Structure formats: structure tokens, C-alpha cells
Image (cartoon, rainbow, N blue to C red):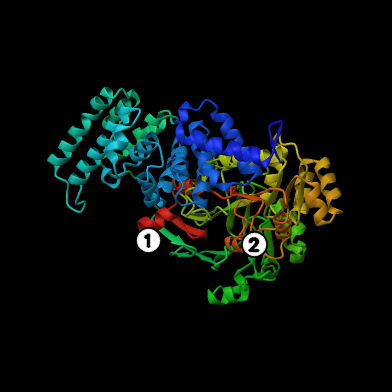
Amino acid sequence: MYKYKDIILTESDVEKIEQDIYYTLENYNIEEIENLKEIDYFIENILYIQKGKKDFLEVLSYIKYNLGEYLLAFQYGLQSFNFNQNSTGIIYATLSLLNLGLYSQAHFTFINNKEKIIDIINSNKSQPDDIINILIYFGVDITLIDDIQSNIENLKDKRKKYLYILINLIRDRKKEIFKNLENDIQEKDLRSYINEMSDIPNILLELNLPTLSDLCSLILEFKEDEIDFYKILPCDNLETYIGKALLESIDVKRNKIIYIPKTISKYDFKDNDVEIISYKSKALVSMHLLRIKDEYLIIDCGAHINNLKLEKINIENFISENNIPREKIKSIIISHAHLDHYGSLNTIQEYVDEIYMTKDTYNIINIVAKSINIDESKVKIKKDYDEFKIGNLNIKFFPTNHIKGSVGICVEYNNKKIVYTGDFSFNRQCTTQYIDQSNFYEFKDADYLIMETTCGYKNIDLPYIYNKKLFTYFVDLSIKNNKKVIVPSFSVGIAQEYFELINNSTIKANVIVDGSAIRVNEYYNKRKNNVIANNQLNHNKRKNIEEKYYENDIIIVSSGLINDISLAEKYFDLALNDKNMVTILKCKTIGKNLLERKLNAYDSIAINLIDISLSSHANYEDLLKTINMIKPKNLVMVHGKGIKLYDDLYNV
């Protein structure tokens, strides 16, 4: 039985409506369908959330796009494409990113799926007016598209036909002039090219697209500047992102959009004044030794879980292999309370006299890792923005908006400035002290920037504000359809963020936090004086896992990636055996191998897996913005693979 608004439907009722929907979508243009919102509601609530029919994700993406709900069109389109590589969902996901003004994410999506997208276009599964938007924006070569003539002749807006032809002419003319970039461009050819481009505003005026005419005038007037003029125009219409395509086609010189440091390296660096030595392993475990003249300082000393065992850094080997004078190591700074940054602390504390961290970091480590047994006599508690000395080094802490208590570190000595970002973000999170990019301006022209690059290769990530909307939307949608929601989570930071996102929304449901995240939630709630939330946590502690599963609507459970003995995995097993549909927001916490092994054991599964990337790390664009802002002389990339742009351009 299925609930559609206030009506109870049988299986046969649903099947009949489903057939009617198929008939309607196949026989009518979408703008002719008067009850499109009703169809959208039925597919999303009944066929997807209540029945889990993934073959309707493609239809949902198409409908959401035509309803102007671009964020959901992107999410459903990407899910559909991951489910079926021939799905038109990837086209509507890409177009939705353009309509949201997320140009770099759209470009990444298109480039990484270009062959598939062109194959889908050539299969004639999409509407001509949608196809042409892709072709125009990305300047797809006209020769790659089969039956292009019939496609562009069937366009409702004939102006797009001429724009596409125009962009191809511009691209071909530009190729002809710049075909051999190693040779000098002849001045007469360049002048001819610019003169030809000068006619474009007149052509566009004839096409009645004044926005583009204004844009081209700006380009021709300011072509020597490095300003993205399209950003000063509205970003919510087709003309604007076509304009950006023209901007890229007409611009006659390479646009230097990124600052290039004097040196770019990964993990290690050395010059006459400074040496930076980082611990390296396949796991993202952080430990960095700074040597400035004769002064030494260690920042972070992480560990990781391998085969269910804690693997710590072998400090003695690290010191001897790098010829570090043991007597010179006197102090360590812990940037925040995540295991990959503090997990080897009980080993390294034998080597140092002082351990610096914030009060929140100290308290959280003691809550989640009592086995660390920190030597309290060595602990020096500091606050955000505190300035102090370690030996002859001048130290300043600054907040990084990663988790509660996280800090970055600025080290100055002998007219040299080293900035260590630690893990950071510019997201507006519920549980941290917000910082914006201007907070980093004070470190402009630093000599050395040691920067995390967790998301240095993930340039499809949506801005955090969009992921927050998606998270609460799918939780709310599931609850309204009487479906349980499970959110596997890491213990510190993100579990509390999930809890607050739900708590601050209009969602009405019983919420439980389980696993080691309980104690961290209690600490966060005490800091907020949230007595009611802690009473609920204490009430749930006294129950077994089955009781907690069936009595609660939303379950946020740690720890970490689901593995074969984690508490999250036990909840996952209960969901797999639940006869009712369950929504799992996996949020990058379920390993692909485990997922396939688990799901293959079942003939039919009542689970909707929805992947939403809620990360408290700086995203790809924020990493580039941080470098552009600080403009360091030397960049050392740590805690990740590096940054794809630098690897592609400079083979770092």
C-alpha cells in the first residue's frame, strides 16, 4: 500500500498511474503537460522514495529541470547517470549547474563525461532546445553531432541556431590564426581577427540579444584586462552563460586566472632558510616538522585505523631517517581533534616539553580517545588569535572553521613567515566559528604556505549551502513519506553538523545520535546549554540497537566509514533486512567494495542510497582562491594528492 497525499493506493493503482505517466511523457511536449507538478510529485514521492524505482531518476531530472528546480535536477541527473551511463540525466545535471551559475563545476562535469554526453546527444533522446544549450555553451564542434541540421532546424528559439553557427565560426577562425602557438602571431592576422570580432555586437543586435551585445562591447573595450566581465551580469538566464562562451571564444590572450608561486611542492620543501618535512603514507595522516634556522617545531602527529587497529607514526624512525637532532624538538602544536592529526600524541609527547592546542581540541581528544592519556603537565591551552612565543618563534593561532576548536598556525622568525592552514573551510556551518576568505588576507605575501589539499582533485563539489539544502530536503522528503533515514557519520564535527541541520529545520521526527559521536554531541550540547538534547541522548543510551532502530525516525551513527564491525554497519544490516523502504544518506561514508558485497547478497533491496557531499574541508575553488589571496612565495601542498590544476600545468 502506498500513500499519495491523503489517498491510499494499491500496487495496481500505482502501476496504472505509472503507465499513464509514461504515455503522457512520450506523446506530449513537456510544456504542453498541464499537470506536470502532479506528475513530479507522484514520481518523486511514490515511485522513488516509497518504491525505490531508480529508472525514474532520469525522468525526475528532466521534469525538475523544466520546473526550474535546478538543484534537484542536478542531484537526480547525477544519480541517474551513476545508475545508467546512457541516461540523459547527465545533460540535465550539466545544464542545471549552468543555470545555478556554477560554471567551473559544469565545465568539469562536461569535460569528464564529454564522449558519453555527445553519444547521448546523438541518440536523439533529449529535446533539441536542451541539446543546443550544451552545444553553445561548451562550443562543441559541429562535426561531432550527427544530424545536426535537423536538430537546429527544430529549435523553438531560432536565435540559438545562429549563435551556435557563430561560435563554431569564431572557434575555427581562432584555430586558423593561432594554429601554431610556438610561432609569433602575425600582427596583420591578429588585427584581422579583432576586426572580425568587432562585428559580433552588430550580429547579436540583429539576433535581439542585448545582454550579449553589451558583453561583447565590454570585451572589445577591456580585452587587455584580466577581469571576468560576465560576472557583473545576471547569472540566471541562458543569454548570460552563452555570453561566457563568447567571452572565452573571443578573448585573444591566455587569461591568467591563478597566481603561480615561485615554487610548488608536495609534502617537503627546503631552501637556505627553512626546511619542511612531512610524514608521508597512503593514509592522510598529518605530521610536519618545521626547521627555521636552528629552531624546530612539530605541527600535528596523526594516526589512522588499518584492519581495525590503530596505526601510529613511528616517531623514532621519522627522526632518525630525516637526521633531526632529537634535543632540538621541544614543542608540538595540535591543530584540531581529528585522529589523523593527533592519534600519535601519546608517543610523541615523550619527546617534547610543551603541547599547544585550544581548549576545545584538548577536551574533545579526552572525550573520544581516553587511551591517548595526554600528559597534562605539558599542555599549554591557547585561544583563537592568541599570539605567543615558542623559543624564538612568534606563533599566532587563527580559526579555520573545520570543527570546534580547529586552528591554523602562523609562524614568524628571522623575517620569514610560514602559514599552516590545517584543515579549513569557508562554509557556513552550524557548529563552528565562521570565517570568510578575508580572514586570510593578513597572511598576504607569506614566504611559505603549507596548505591542505583534501579536495584538490574534487572540482565537481557543490557549494556547501547547496549541499545543506539537499541534505535537509531528502531527510524531510523521506520522513514525510514515513521512511526511516540513516546517516553514517564520523564522530567529531560532521555528526554534530548533521544533528544541528536537522534540529534547525522544520523536520518533525525522532532523532538519535549513536556510537562514539554521542559523547561529542553531549560536549557540543553542553557548550550550547542544550539540556533537552542531552536528556534525549542519555535516554537512548539505555536501549539496545534494535530498540533504537525501530523507535527512531532519523539515526546519525558513527563511526567513520562503514566497515564489517562498526556500529554503523550494524544499522546498515538492520536496514537491509527491513521490509519497509529506508533512506541512507551515505555522504561519502560507505566504501564501494563493501556496498557491492552487501547489496549483491539481496535479490531486492528496500533502500534508497543518496550521496550528498557535506564536507568541512575547503573545496577545489576555495583552495585556488586561498592561494590567490595569500600569494605565497612558496607553496607546499599536504594532506591530499595536491591540486589538479597545478599538476596539469606544472607537473608538480
Q: Tell me the residue that label 1 is attached to.
A: 651
Compared to residue 530, the image places residue 5 above or below, namely above
Residue 179 coordinates in the image, percent (x, y): 20, 49
Secondary structure category for the residue under label 2? helix
Using the numbered discs, state the Cα–Cα distance from disc 2 to disc 1 in whole angstroms.
39 Å
Circle 2 or circle 1, nearest the eye: 2
Residue 563 coordinates in the image, percent (x, y): 67, 63
Q: Nearer the viewer, residue 618 or 275?
A: 618
Which residue is rendered at x = 22% and y = 38% of the image?
169
Amino acid type assigned to the residue bearing label 1 in the image: Asn
Compared to residue 572, the image places residue 384 above or below, namely above
Amino acid type assigned to the residue bearing label 2 in the image: Lys
Which label is found at residue 27?
none
* Quarter of the view holding residue 14: top right
Which residue is rendered at x = 62% and y = 57% of the image?
590
Q: Residue furthest left?
A: 188
Secondary structure category for the residue under label 1? loop
Quarter of the figure with the N terminus: top right
Compared to residue 492, the image places residue 214 above or below, namely above
Q: Tell me the residue that label 2 is attached to.
A: 598
